[in-house]
């Protein structure tokens, strides 16, 4: 985790210390131990500090940019579903501060980077699949709806920030027409799926190592949860933008999830082949959005490390687009933008 010193010039730091001073002495907070824990793609950042029972996490979410209320609301739903999420120890929603229980220092992503063997990886991911199934049984009423309108809007991020600004290109009239038809088909298919509670980033950076071997992960960064397509989160997990899963591993996770979801009565259908196609099309939707979002984070917000993940996302997109005839126009556009020659003189696949 990030261990850089905190700048004394930080304008929110004094407000944070003043808030900590108002909290119950029973928490045993040691303000002088405040240190960075992590940050994310938004304006939120996180600190760790010592408390009586060990350590705790502070979420700092500047209210002019972020709203802590969705996090509090979703945390309650997930706790009631029996999931391992941070407990809220103290809060000041107007200032944008939350004091949270600490789920540990290591995410799945960090553990994978440190080199897990196949057995250890399966020991982590099988419980994560069961946690996903339980999360999808939590109530989703009242959450923002991830509908066709929103899905289509997100594909605009791909065209604006990836095609136009990152690649410095424009689509030809024929490319634009073909992609409009393809995107309409993709969105209609994804939006037609049954709705469940969707985390939106259920992948290795947001899963914390379990407390005991074989236990379920801690789940973080769920404040953007929506009511949306049932395949979205399994697509997030098996086509992880920050860690490469080869197709045999993707298929293994997907089959295990589908079996557990069916056993739990979730509406995943009785035909795995159709479910596999549906979640692959959902992964394509997600990964096109990610190309645009990561390009925007680099170009607009100077978070250039996100560009390092684009080759992996390209491969996930190519994997799906090459498998289905209706998606081939997208594959040709992606190849052109990357300077890849067609596989035959007619540019067909």
Image: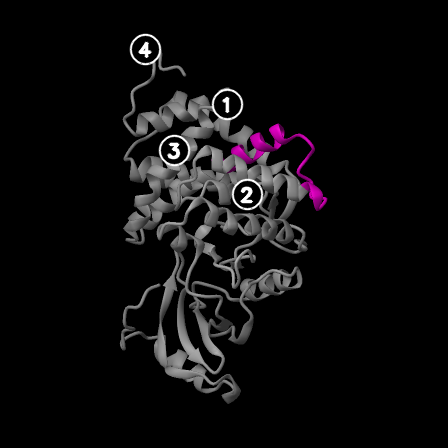
| Residue under the point 60% across and 60% down | 83
> Helix, strand, or loop for circle 4?
loop
In the picture of the structure, the residue carrying the numbered disc 3 is 315
Kindly report the distance in space between the C-alpha atoms of the residues bearing marks 2 and 3: 18 Å
- 108 vs 154: above or below: below
Q: Which residue is at 55% across, 55% downward?
A: 214
Q: Are marks 4 and 2 in contact (CB under 8 Å)?
A: no
**Quadrant occupied by the N terminus:** bottom left
Tell me where residue 333 sits by quadrant.
Answer: top left
Q: Which residue is mark 1?
A: 324
Which range is magenta? 262-284
Q: Which residue is mark 2?
A: 234
Secondary structure beneath dot 1 equals loop
Label number found at residue 345: 4
Query: Left or right: 312 with respect to 137?
Result: left
* Alpha carbon distance from label 2 to label 1: 20 Å
Dot 1 or dot 3, earlier in sequence: 3
> Marks 4 and 2, how far apart in space?
38 Å
x%, y% of residue 63?
45, 68
Q: Is residue 148 left or right of residue 345?
A: right
């Amino acid at each position: 985790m990030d261990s850089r010193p905190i700048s004394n010039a930080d304008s929110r730091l004094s407000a944070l210390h003043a808030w900590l001073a108002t909290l119950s002495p029973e928490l045993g907070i040691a303000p002088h131990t405040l240190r960075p824990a992590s940050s994310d793609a938004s304006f939120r950042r996180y600190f760790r500090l010592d408390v009586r029972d060990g350590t705790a996490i502070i979420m700092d979410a500047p209210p002019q940019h972020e709203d802590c209320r969705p996090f509090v609301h979703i945390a309650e739903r997930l706790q009631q579903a029996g999931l391992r999420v941070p407990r809220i120890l103290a809060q000041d929603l107007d200032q944008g501060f939350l004091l949270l229980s600490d789920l540990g220092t290591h995410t799945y992503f960090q553990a994978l980077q440190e080199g897990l063997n196949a057995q250890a990886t399966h020991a982590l991911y099988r419980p994560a699949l069961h946690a996903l199934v339980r999360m999808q049984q939590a109530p989703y009423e009242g959450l923002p709806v991830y509908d066709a309108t929103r899905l289509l809007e997100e594909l605009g991020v791909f065209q604006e920030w990836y095609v136009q600004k990152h690649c410095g290109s424009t689509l030809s009239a024929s490319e634009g027409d073909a992609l409009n038809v393809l995107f309409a088909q993709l969105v209609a298919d994804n939006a037609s799926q049954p709705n469940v509670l969707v985390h939106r980033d259920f992948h290795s950076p947001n899963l914390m190592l379990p407390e005991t071997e074989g236990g379920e992960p801690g789940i973080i960064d769920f404040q953007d949860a929506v009511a949306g397509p049932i395949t979205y989160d399994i697509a997030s997990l098996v086509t992880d933008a920050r860690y490469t899963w080869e197709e045999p591993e993707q298929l293994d996770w997907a089959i295990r999830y589908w079996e557990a979801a069916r056993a739990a009565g979730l509406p995943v259908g009785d035909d795995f082949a159709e479910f596999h196609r549906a979640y692959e099309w959902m992964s394509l939707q997600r990964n096109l959005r990610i190309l645009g979002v990561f390009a925007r984070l680099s170009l607009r917000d100077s978070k250039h490390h996100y560009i390092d993940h684009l080759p992996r996302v390209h491969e996930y997109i190519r994997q799906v687009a090459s498998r289905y005839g209706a998606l081939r126009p997208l594959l040709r556009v992606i190849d052109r933008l990357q300077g890849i020659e067609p596989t035959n003189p007619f540019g067909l696949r």
